[in-house]
Amino acid sequence: MDHDKEDLQRYLQQLREAVIWKMEGLTQRQLRWPQTPSGTNLLGMVKHLSALEFGYLGMVFDRPGEPTPWLGPDSEPEEDMWATPDESSAWLLGLYGRACAHANETIASLSLDSTGYVPWWSEEKRHPTLHTIIVHVTIETARHLGHIDIVRELTDGGIGLYAHNANTPGWDPEKLRRHKARLEEVALGFD
């Protein structure tokens, strides 16, 4: 594997690992609980990211993975963004792991200039390279990991960048409360 491909895959893998880490230690209810007005929840993000991996780093390069029926014409609205009662957290986390492994096989088997086909993109952009798709999936994963970060913090106060690198000051709950109160005080000074 060439150096550029290794770099791209390493950054994507770090994000994937953070997604899984953010699910650790929570109950089934906490993993499913909608924390925003639009219903954003942790398992829904994992389900969505699984379809993203199978789609962009599978189907786009004629390497279909497991079926994702929640994206079909008979699915409920936004069904890819929440876990149905029959979709366990173990199954969805396993699906994400399998989707990432399938995507890694695609990356390993193709050169960065290999061309795929994305039928849902505009005509002029429908034939991207593997390089473009890896960047796209990395950006999407990072975007949704940001949602996961916020939902996890709202769920149980859990914060941090990666399991091995919290990238936070390590404050105790009281210091965090005082910090938030200070920020609220500053914000109240504005209309």
Image (spheres, rainbow, N blue to C red):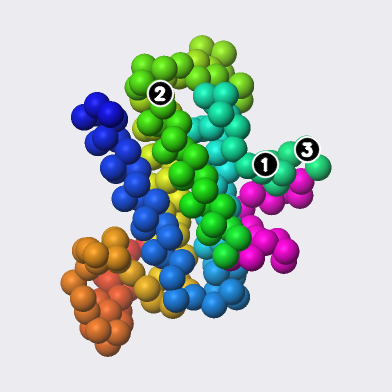
Quadrant occupied by the C terminus:
bottom left
Disc ID at residue 110: 2
Would residue 12 be visible to someone looking at this image? yes
Q: Residues within 10 Å of mark 1 (few under 14, many from 20)?
A: few
As measured in the structure, the alpha-carbon distance from the residue carrying label 2 to the one carrying label 3 is 31 Å
Amino acid type, mark 1: Pro
Disc 1 marks which residue?
67
Q: Residue at x 59, y 70 (%)?
A: 33
The answer to whether 161 appears left or right of 87 in the picture is: left
**Secondary structure state at the residue bearing disc 3:** loop
In the image, residue 168 sits, relative to residue 108, either above or below, namely below
- Looking at the picture, which amino acid does disc 2 mark? Leu
Q: Is residue 115 left or right of residue 69?
A: left
Nearest the viewer among 32 and 176 is: 32
Does 73 lie within the magenta span?
no
Query: In the rendered image, which quarter is residue 169 located in?
Result: bottom left
Tell me which segment is drawn in magenta: 75-89
Count the labels in the image. 3
The circle drawn on residue 73 is 3
Q: Earlier in the sequence, mark 2 or mark 1?
A: 1
Give the CA distance from mark 1 to mark 3: 13 Å
Magenta region, main secondary structure: loop
Query: Which is nearer the eye, 55 or 66?
Result: 66
Q: Are marks 1 and 3 in contact (CB under 8 Å)?
A: no
Q: Position of residue 108 (x, y in %)?
A: 38, 31
Q: Dot 3, how many residues are within 10 Å of its Cα: few (below 14), some (14-19), or many (20+)?
A: few
Residue at screen point 59% across, 38% down? 65
